[in-house]
Image: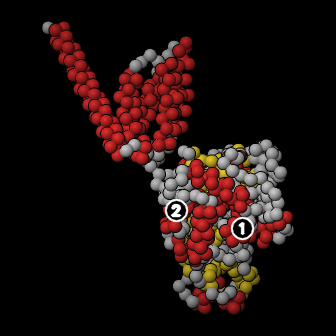
Amino acid sequence: MKKQFILLSVAAIGVTLSTPAYSADTTSHVLAMQNEPQKKLNSEYMEKSTLSNADFIKNLVKEKGQDAVVSIWKLGEGSEYKSGVKLQDLEKALPENTQFVVINHKNSHENTVFIVNKNDEIINSQKEYDDLFKDRNFLLNTGKTVHTSFDIVSDLNLRYLLAAGGLRTGGIQRLNTSGVQINSQRIHFSTDINYFSEYITLEKYQQNDEKLIELIKQAGINAEEDSDEEKVKKWIIYVLNTFPYDSQADDSNKYADYLKASNIFSVTERQLAMCLGFSVTTARALNLMGIPAYQVQGQLGLNNRSSGAHATTRAYFGKKWHTIDTTSNWSSGENHQVYNDQNYSERIDRYNLLDVSQRGASSSASNPQGFMTINADFENWAKKQDTKTLLYLNSERALKNRIPHMISEELKQNLITRRQELVKALQTVADGTYDSSNEWRGQKAKNFLETLLKDTKNLPNEELDLEDYERYNDVLDSVYPYYGQLTADKALSQKLEPLNQQAKILRELEELKQNPNKLTQEELAKKTAELQAQKAKAEQSEADEVVEQQAEEAAQKAAQKEQEEKQAR
């Protein structure tokens, strides 16, 4: 259970949202961040004035006259700083450590002047913005505010990574006044919810990771030797049996109490938490153990004691993503259910899922199971990253660096070729001319073609692991039988037969590469050699077929030519 003033991680973009935990606006905002290209605002170029404030004002007086009145806007603040200021009083009206901003080579716009803090950054390109995130330690310890002349395109994957570690960057503030549009953002890394109103330092974050590593050891987990499933089981049992729910913070009317129970330090420093604290701690711990994980939020269902907002953890193990709920259901001093090997699985995959990467996604808290908002696009990306990438900060303390196995370019190209052949064959049927009794064939072919293209649209540009390969291969396998029902033409099957044989061999080779410990070194070498020999034989057979086909075509052409010459005589 959670209070309704929840900080939603589907929008781990630094924006604090209140109840409900999901709204249509949330989805559209996330999708906009994922899909929209950089958009130039009407403030095409801006820079800090190179003049002193006094000299800048002198130029304004020349332009507007001594008695002109202006308004002052300070970039990064949500409202006008001062209005009705005479130029002769302007310098005195400025706050300390600020300077003027020149926008589109103009000192003022509609009698408005703009100022910034002297240590703020003015940025005019997305590249400059992206470069700020490269120095992670600098950002964590200091931070800065940036103001841009373009519509910032945030890296959504980065936002989810930060949220998985209990971190966030400041929200984007958009200024539109006096014909000027400017975006501002505080670029710093702080706890997902401010911890005692302090920005987190790298040293504090590193110390917290050490405490998490100690908890992992106390849970009896060997990050190198235990399977992912075993690590998840031990962690769930340990957390649920060890750390109570902070019911006092839940009942308190003080927001500060809620914050203390809802961040990356809640479990490690206070030994009790609310759901945000439990879920982000679990995400960070699993990532340290080499299991891709991130925090998700949504609603408890009617089967629970409350249907309020809630947070859990998504984790990738056993070749799929799972939802893990490690929020304890007991308070200090209470008797509680003891979790063990037999019942820990009650806390896995107990919620429906709402994928915010899909347009039109919707759900309802009235669902008996409740729901969690996930992002399938992020999950597809995250499972292909190594552990150190997912940890983002202090990655050298990873207990196990999971390195995902991507399939060979040869196997991927085989898959693409088979897809192309099936597309061409379906297109041929769809474009064919039929009498009215056979018109349905063309329509059916178009329908299957649309399904195939839709379900495999990302294949050419996507880096594939074995799970991705199987997913795309299943799409081809599901469509191919229907093609056989539309036509008796055997050309496609003749083209696919050697490709399928090659794919089977390449697939086995990939399996051996990914799981070399299943065989002894001698068995592995022998099996690999056998598969390579089969592959070479299949390739030679295919080459022989091509030569044979070419020879047959040449013979047919020669016979046709001879026949034509006879007729000519």
Give percent across and percent down for residue 556.
23, 16
The residue that mark 2 highlights is 399
Give the amino acid type for the residue marked by disc 1 in the picture: Gln
- What SS does tag 1 mark? loop
Identify the mark at residue 271; answer none if there is no mark: 1
Q: Quadrant of residue 98?
A: bottom right
Residue at position x 83%, y 70% in the image: 254
Who is closer to the viewer here, 309 or 250? 250
Residue at position x 48%, y 32% in the image: 476
- Crowdedness of circle 2 by 10 Å Cα count: few (<14), some, many (20+)? many
Instruction: Please report whichever mark, 2 or 1, sits nearer to the chain's N-terminal start.
Output: 1
One can see residue 3 in this view:
no
Q: Quadrant of residue 61?
A: bottom right
- Image quarter in which the C terminus is found: top left
Give the amino acid type for the residue marked by disc 2 in the picture: Leu
Above or below, comparing residue 48 to residue 530 in the picture = below
- What SS does tag 2 mark? loop
Q: Is residue 356 left or right of residue 256?
A: left
Query: Which scheme is used to colour this image of the protein?
Result: secondary structure
Circles 2, 1 touching at the beta carbon (< 8 Å): no
Residue at position x 58%, y 65% in the image: 213
Identify the mark at residue 376; answer none if there is no mark: none
Give percent across and percent down for residue 14.
66, 65
Above or below, comparing residue 551 to residue 521 in the picture = above
Above or below, comparing residue 500 to residue 217 in the picture = above
Q: Is residue 109 left or right of residue 450?
A: right
Residue at position x 71%, y 57% in the image: 240
- Image quarter in which the N terminus is found: bottom right
Give percent across and percent down for residue 380.
54, 49
